[in-house]
């Protein structure tokens, strides 16, 4: 083990992470949050950005396209786009759908989002560019 970072409030039930450039982007199910760490020096990861919002209630998977994080949420049956380019992550939009009931799988390819809902039994392919941003 090289180093641990512990914060039971901010990182409670961290369930997914993805490397993006020199950063590690994480989401925490119980904390309703997204955190970005600079990991250019793995011996000294530094927290860069943090967003906690009840609008993110229960995020469970994460995938990144360019400077946008896409999170799926199996509690509220939705997906969210979060802009990572500013000093603080910003929610651009949240898209709820009954087709995302208990959505558990998320990946990206060629700018598209691929999602599967466990209970709805749907496999969805979504172009995130079609949604109007706030």
Image: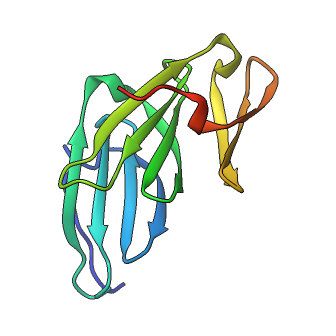
Q: Name the quarter where the N terminus is drawn.
A: bottom left
Image coordinates of residue 110 in percent, x first then y, are: 71, 56
Quarter occupied by residue 12:
top left
Indicate the colouring scheme. rainbow
Point 43% across, 74% down: residue? 21
- Foreground of the two, 86 or 62: 86
How many discs appear? 0
Would you place residue 9 above or below residue 55 in this image? below
Q: Please identify the residue farthest to the top as the structure is shown.
A: 98
Q: Name the quarter where the C terminus is drawn.
A: top left
Point 28% across, 37% down: residue? 31
Image coordinates of residue 65 in percent, x first then y, are: 54, 55
- Foreground of the two, 81 or 23: 81
- Foreground of the two, 6 or 89: 89
Image coordinates of residue 111 in percent, x first then y, are: 65, 51
Would you place residue 108 above or below residue 46 in this image? above
């Amino acid at each position: 083990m090289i180093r641990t970072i512990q914060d039971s409030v901010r990182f409670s039930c961290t369930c997914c992470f993805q490397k993006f450039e020199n950063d590690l982007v994480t989401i925490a199910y119980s904390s309703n949050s997204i955190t970005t760490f600079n990991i250019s020096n793995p011996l000294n990861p530094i927290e860069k950005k943090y967003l906690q919002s009840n609008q993110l209630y229960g995020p469970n998977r994460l995938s990144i396209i360019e400077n946008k994080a896409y999170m799926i949420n199996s509690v509220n049956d939705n997906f969210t786009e979060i802009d990572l380019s500013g000093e603080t992550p910003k929610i651009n939009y949240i898209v709820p759908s009954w087709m995302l009931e208990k959505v558990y799988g998320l990946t990206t390819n060629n700018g598209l989002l691929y999602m599967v809902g466990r209970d709805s039994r749907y496999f969805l392919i979504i172009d995130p560019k079609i949604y109007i941003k706030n």
